[in-house]
Image (tube, rainbow, N blue to C red):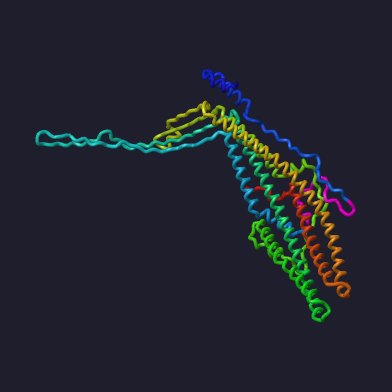
């Protein structure tokens, strides 16, 4: 049974027990509620995903310390670097996250102010006076006499007043200190949320840019293939008119060319939508980047390719670098402090108040011939009965704390899963790209042989048709695989916690 509970059962012990408890707590600077202890993350010592490098398949992953600073610059694309800088400066989600950081900073200052006394100045002016009253006397016989006089008549008077009121809640049980802890943790979490927004933004900008370059490469391939197929169809039609081939070959050639042409509108739509999305990420209107992204004549920009292998470090380092994990840990700390804040509300509150006032009939008298009054003394507020509301508030805060502990553990698992998934995707897609390159090379040779044999009359047009179709499909799939390799590289760097570390992290307000 603590001192407060003994007081409730024995009110006569107020002078000795309560006073001793309050003074002792004040000197010790105690704060009720649980003290924060960082949760232990259940992380493995090494990453599970590995790759056995061979002569034909170079390593794509390494367990060296991760280099996450400006990882997108290793794609060696100046326009991409410029777009990332513009997006960091103009993106609306980042601007919103920045505003939340500023809000959290103001809340932190507000919570810190509660630890100090407050002082208010007061002043007033009153002008007053007494009114007049009329008295009438009556008659004798037929004569009437009336007399009017003034009783209690006086002039108006002025009263000037000024003073100071001060109060200070002595934070004996740490309610205000716990509130300050919670505000500080909330500010830290807001900063990590902002870094999460930056990480997500850079990943999205880089991904959209790579996808747009991929669509441009696929469009260039489709147009080039369609032109070649149209020329083949023209030559086949000429040969048909000369009686050197059948109408079936001419029809098949024309149909294959039109089939390739039919893929172009869908690719153009996907490209336009991707560029529109990229422009919005930079904080501009959807059509703002159309001209900058257009490929120059006869020179299709290549799909950015990453430098391999990618260093991943160890899982413990990733958990320190991931801003979403750090934000979840700070929110757990914030709600741990709120448990103490709710617990402190169940204990007595001691407030020291004081006032100083002066009054006079003239303004100048306030400093010379005034009437001065003052008061000072403590006041104690003791919760005696609240039907369990304060205890319920503690239970609510404790349940919220438990939820944020679970959220932290979930964020840890998500971070580990993201790295493992991105690692295996990058490793396997790199292998697939190499196989697709060999396939495209082989189909290219097959197409050359088929055309040569067809021209010499050694084979039918069906072999040419099949070879051209297979070559186009292999080349188109190869481009898509190269895009996937780069997007997997982007996903891995995002999963490792790589983000912006430039001037945009400095808040000037």
| Front residue of this view, candidates 299 and 156 | 299
Q: Residue 421, relative to residue 222: is it above or below?
A: above
Q: Is residue 372 left or right of residue 216?
A: left
Q: Residue 240, relative to residue 44: is it above or below?
A: below
Q: Residue 493 in the image: state x and y as whole percent.
A: 76, 49
Q: Residue 45 in the image: state x and y as whole percent.
A: 80, 39
Q: Is residue 452 visible?
A: no
Asked whether 345 falls inside the magenta stretch, the response is no
Q: In this picture, which residue range is highlighted in magenta?
A: 54-76
Q: Is residue 68 left or right of residue 91?
A: right
* Residue beneath the point at 76% across and 64% down: 218
Q: In this view, does 148 lie to the left or right of 406?
A: left
* Residue beneath the point at 64% across and 51% down: 93
| Front residue of this view, candidates 268 and 278 | 268
| Front residue of this view, candidates 400 and 435 | 435
Query: Looking at the figure, which quarter contains the N terminus?
Result: top right
* Residue beneath the point at 17% across and 37% down: 146
Q: How many marks are shown on the rendered structure? A: 0
Q: Residue 153 in the image: state x and y as whole percent.
A: 28, 35
Residue at the farthest left position:
142
**Quarter of image, res 445:** bottom right
Q: Residue 466, relative to residue 77: is it above or below?
A: below
**Quarter of image, res 171:** top right
Q: Residue 448 in the image: state x and y as whole percent.
A: 86, 69
Dominant SS in magenta: loop
Asked whether 75 falls inside the magenta stretch, the response is yes
Q: Is residue 339 visible?
A: yes
């Amino acid at each position: 049974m603590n001192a407060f509970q003994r007081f409730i059962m024995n009110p006569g012990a107020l002078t000795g027990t309560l006073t001793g408890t309050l003074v002792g707590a004040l000197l010790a600077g105690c704060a009720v509620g649980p003290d924060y202890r960082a949760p232990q993350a259940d992380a493995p010592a090494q990453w599970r995903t590995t790759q056995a490098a061979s002569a034909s398949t170079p390593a794509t992953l390494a367990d060296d310390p991760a280099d996450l600073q400006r990882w997108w610059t290793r794609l060696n694309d100046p326009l991409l670097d410029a777009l990332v800088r513009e997006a960091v400066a103009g993106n609306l989600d980042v601007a919103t996250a920045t505003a939340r950081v500023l809000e959290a900073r103001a809340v932190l200052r507000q919570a810190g102010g509660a630890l100090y006394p407050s002082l208010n100045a007061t002043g007033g002016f009153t002008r007053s006076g007494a009114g007049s009253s009329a008295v009438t006397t009556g008659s004798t016989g037929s004569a009437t006499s009336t007399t009017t006089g003034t009783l209690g008549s006086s002039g108006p008077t002025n009263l000037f007043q000024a003073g100071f009121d001060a109060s200070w809640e002595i934070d004996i049980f740490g309610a205000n200190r716990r509130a300050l802890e919670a505000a500080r943790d909330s500010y830290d979490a807001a900063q990590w949320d902002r870094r999460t927004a930056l990480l997500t933004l850079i990943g999205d900008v880089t991904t959209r840019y790579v996808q747009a370059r991929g669509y441009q490469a696929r469009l260039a391939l489709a147009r080039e293939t369609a032109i070649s197929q149209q020329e083949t169809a023209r030559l086949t039609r000429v040969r048909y008119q000369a009686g050197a081939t059948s109408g079936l070959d001419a029809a098949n050639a024309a149909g294959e060319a039109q089939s390739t042409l039919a893929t172009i509108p869908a690719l153009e739509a996907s490209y336009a939508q991707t560029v529109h999305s990229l422009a919005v990420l930079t904080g501009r209107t959807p059509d703002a980047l159309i001209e900058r992204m257009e490929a120059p004549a006869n020179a299709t920009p290549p799909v950015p390719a990453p430098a391999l292998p990618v260093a991943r470090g160890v899982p413990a380092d990733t958990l320190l670098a991931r801003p979403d994990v750090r934000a979840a840990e700070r929110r757990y700390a914030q709600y741990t402090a709120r448990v103490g804040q709710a617990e402190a509300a169940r204990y007595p509150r001691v407030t020291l108040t004081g006032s100083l006032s002066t009054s006079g009939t003239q303004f100048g008298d306030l400093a010379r011939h005034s009437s001065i009054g003052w008061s000072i003394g403590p006041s104690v507020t003791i919760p005696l009965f609240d039907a369990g509301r304060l205890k319920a508030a503690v239970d609510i805060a404790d349940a919220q704390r438990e939820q944020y502990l679970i959220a932290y553990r979930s964020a840890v698992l998500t971070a580990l899963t993201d790295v493992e998934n991105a690692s295996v995707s990058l490793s396997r897609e790199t292998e697939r790209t190499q196989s697709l390159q060999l396939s495209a090379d082989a189909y290219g040779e097959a197409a050359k042989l088929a055309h040569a044999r067809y021209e010499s009359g050694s084979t039918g047009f069906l072999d040419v048709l099949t070879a051209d179709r297979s070559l186009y499909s292999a080349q188109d799939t190869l481009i898509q695989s190269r895009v996937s390799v780069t997007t997997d590289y982007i996903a891995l760097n995002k999963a490792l916690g790589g983000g912006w570390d430039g001037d945009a992290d400095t808040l000037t307000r």
